[in-house]
Image (tube, rainbow, N blue to C red):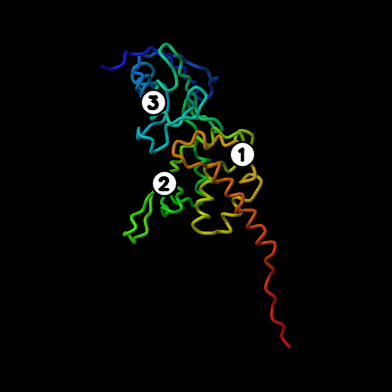
């Protein structure tokens, strides 16, 4: 027997270009097992066709449906309504923070993707570098690779206090990507990308990014590891003397 329907007020932050941001309330009858994205889609289909939002895969792979739900960054396609409210309750939906809002729940991801592009992030990595649980077959001598779990959703940027105070900050996802790439193959360019005021040293070590990451990438741990790598590289560079040129008689 299915659970009885709930009546929930969805408070959605509306902000079209040129308009003042404001919350609009949409009362909706829902199945508590539904996900927040299901409700938003039904609001668009049945109540308000002017509502703008992004959605695609519906199973936490594409990362485009990231929003703030009752003040917490979530992938709305896998966030059950019953996990964020109760019957007769409220679900407040806002766009991600620390991004320019284009319209309603749609934000400009361009700067984020540019930072990721600078890292030359490879979404496929040898299993040993992915820092993910995996039991290889000892009889298999073929090197195994897998997709790295970062889905580039931007939730970590939205939750990050440092990103709120400095728009030039590289951000948790990009720094985690640098750490992974350096683990696989050292690059002076990537080290320089991390070792500056708006790189690894801008992080406040709040660990909010890891709290909201839907893929268990743990960007906060990766940033701390990246800092250690940067310090070690500085010491190596400090004590590495240039080769003396041969003296000719």
User: In 3D space, how far apart are the residues under numbered discs 3 and 2 (Cα atoms)?
Assistant: 30 Å
The quadrant of the image that shows the N terminus is top left
Residue 34 image-quadrant placement: top left
Q: Quadrant of the C terminus?
A: bottom right
Q: Is residue 206 left or right of residue 216?
A: right
Between label 3 and label 2, give the one nearer the viewer.
2
Q: Secondary structure at mark 1?
A: loop
Packing grade of label 1 (10 A; few <14, some 14-19, many >=20) is some
* Extreme-bottom residue of the structure: 249
Q: Residue at 50% x, 17% y: name it.
A: 23
Residue 142 position within the rendered picture, expressed as x and y whole percent measured from the top left:
34, 60
Q: Dot 3: what SS?
A: helix
Q: Secondary structure at mark 2?
A: loop
Q: Which residue is mark 3?
A: 37
Work out how far the residue at label 1 is from the one at label 3, CA to CA, in angstroms: 31 Å
User: In the image, residue 91 lies at what x, y percent?
Assistant: 45, 18
Q: Residue at x 36, y 53 (%)?
A: 136
What is the spatial separation of the Cα atoms under label 1 and label 2, in whole angstroms?
A: 25 Å
Residue farthest toward the right in the current orientation of the protein: 249
Instruction: Locate residue 121 relative to residue 197 in the image: left or right.
Output: left
Q: Which residue is mark 2?
A: 133
1 or 3: tag closer to the N-terminus: 3
Give the answer, above or below, for where 130 lies relative to 27.
below
Rendering quarter of residue 232: bottom right
Give neighbour class at mark 2: few <14, some 14-19, many 20+ (Cα, 10 Å).
Answer: few
């Amino acid at each position: 027997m299915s659970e009885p329907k709930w009546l929930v007020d969805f408070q959605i932050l509306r902000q079209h270009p040129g308009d003042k941001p404001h919350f609009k309330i949409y009362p909706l009858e829902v199945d508590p097992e539904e996900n927040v994205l299901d409700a938003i889609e039904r609001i668009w289909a049945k109540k308000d066709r002017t509502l703008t939002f992004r959605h695609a895969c519906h199973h936490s792979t594409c990362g485009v449906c990231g929003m703030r739900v009752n003040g917490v960054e979530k992938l709305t396609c896998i966030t059950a309504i019953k996990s964020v409210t109760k019957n007769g309750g409220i679900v407040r939906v806002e766009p991600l923070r620390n991004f320019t809002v284009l319209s309603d729940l749609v934000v400009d991801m361009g700067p984020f993707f540019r930072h990721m592009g600078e890292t030359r992030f490879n979404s496929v990595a040898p299993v040993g570098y992915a820092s993910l649980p995996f039991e290889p077959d000892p009889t298999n001598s073929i090197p195994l690779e897998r997709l790295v779990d970062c889905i580039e959703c931007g939730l970590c940027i939205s939750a990050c206090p440092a990103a709120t105070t400095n728009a030039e900050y590289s951000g948790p996802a990009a720094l985690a990507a640098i750490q992974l790439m350096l683990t696989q193959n050292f690059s002076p360019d990537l080290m320089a990308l991390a070792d500056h005021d708006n790189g690894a040293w801008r992080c406040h070590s709040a660990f909010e990014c890891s709290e909201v990451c839907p893929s268990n990438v743990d960007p906060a741990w990766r940033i701390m590891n990246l800092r250690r790598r940067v310090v070690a590289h500085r010491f190596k560079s400090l004590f590495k003397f240039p080769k003396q040129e041969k003296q000719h008689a």
